[in-house]
Amino acid sequence: MTLPITALTPADSAAAIALLDRAFAEDPCLAWVLRQTQPGYPARRRAYLGAYLRYHQDNALPLLGAWQAEQLLGLSCFTLPEPVADPASLSALGGRIAQACGVDRLARLEQLIDAFDQHLGDAPAARIEFLAVAPEAQGRGLGSALLQASLAYIKNQGCMHIALESGEPRNLALYLRHGFQLSGGVQRDALHQFYLQRLC
């Protein structure tokens, strides 16, 4: 599937949140962080994804989207090692997640973030945060196209080290095809979070 991939703007927020929510409805990582088995999980998931999207937009971080007939079918959001994230903005993100999802769920998220930070060490790296494809568009190459566009963007910014984590084993083949290598992982209850890295 060949679709134009362009930068998303705040005007695309509603479409972006709706897509993220559908694409990550069965995500093992979100299920563990947000406690899927407890009541209210769909609302917590949507609030969590909305908080992350707002953080990316407030800090003008890269957001790429693929459209077809005015419908957003895929998106990628990622961070670069420079500029360093504003501490106040990160604190506000944590506050929004704690308020909407609960302090205990924020603590679970911080467990995963800290483990990944420790794994990567001090080496500066771009991080792919979300790669989302609408369920009806999966299996047609859109994920590959979005990943390629993200890697090209990151390389053009002068960053040569890229990292990501995934709790979904079926997604590993996509990343391995694009030059990522498994570099480790962490186990939390039934969740196995895989770490992948590559050089541009």
Image: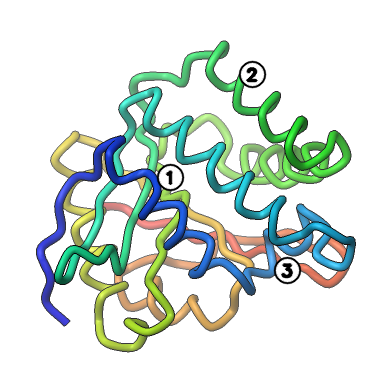
Image position of 16 (left or right of 120): left
Q: Which mark is residue 127?
A: 1
Q: CA distance from mark 2 to mark 3?
A: 27 Å
Which is more toward the observer, 157 or 96?
96
Q: How many marks?
A: 3
| Residue 114 locus on image (x, y percent) | 71, 37
Residue at position x 24%, y 44% from top? 8
Q: Nearer the N terminus, badge 2 or badge 1?
A: 2
Disc 2 or disc 3, which is closer to the eye? Answer: 2
**Separation of residues labelled 2 and 1 (CA atoms):** 19 Å
Spatial CA span between label 3 and label 1: 19 Å
Hey, what amino acid is under mark 1?
A: Arg
Q: Which residue is nearer to you in this view: 10 or 139?
A: 10
Of mark 2 and mark 3, the one earlier in the sequence is: 2
* Quadrant (top left, top right, bottom left, bottom right) of the N terminus: bottom left
Residue at 64 percent across and 18 percent down: it is: 91
Question: Dot 3: within a 10 Å radius of its alpha carbon, few (fewer than 14), some, or many (20 or more) residues?
Answer: some
* Residue at x 37%, y 48% (from the top left corner): 77
Residue type for callout 3? His
Pinpoint residue 42: horizontal percent, then vertical percent: 70, 61
The label shown at residue 91 is 2
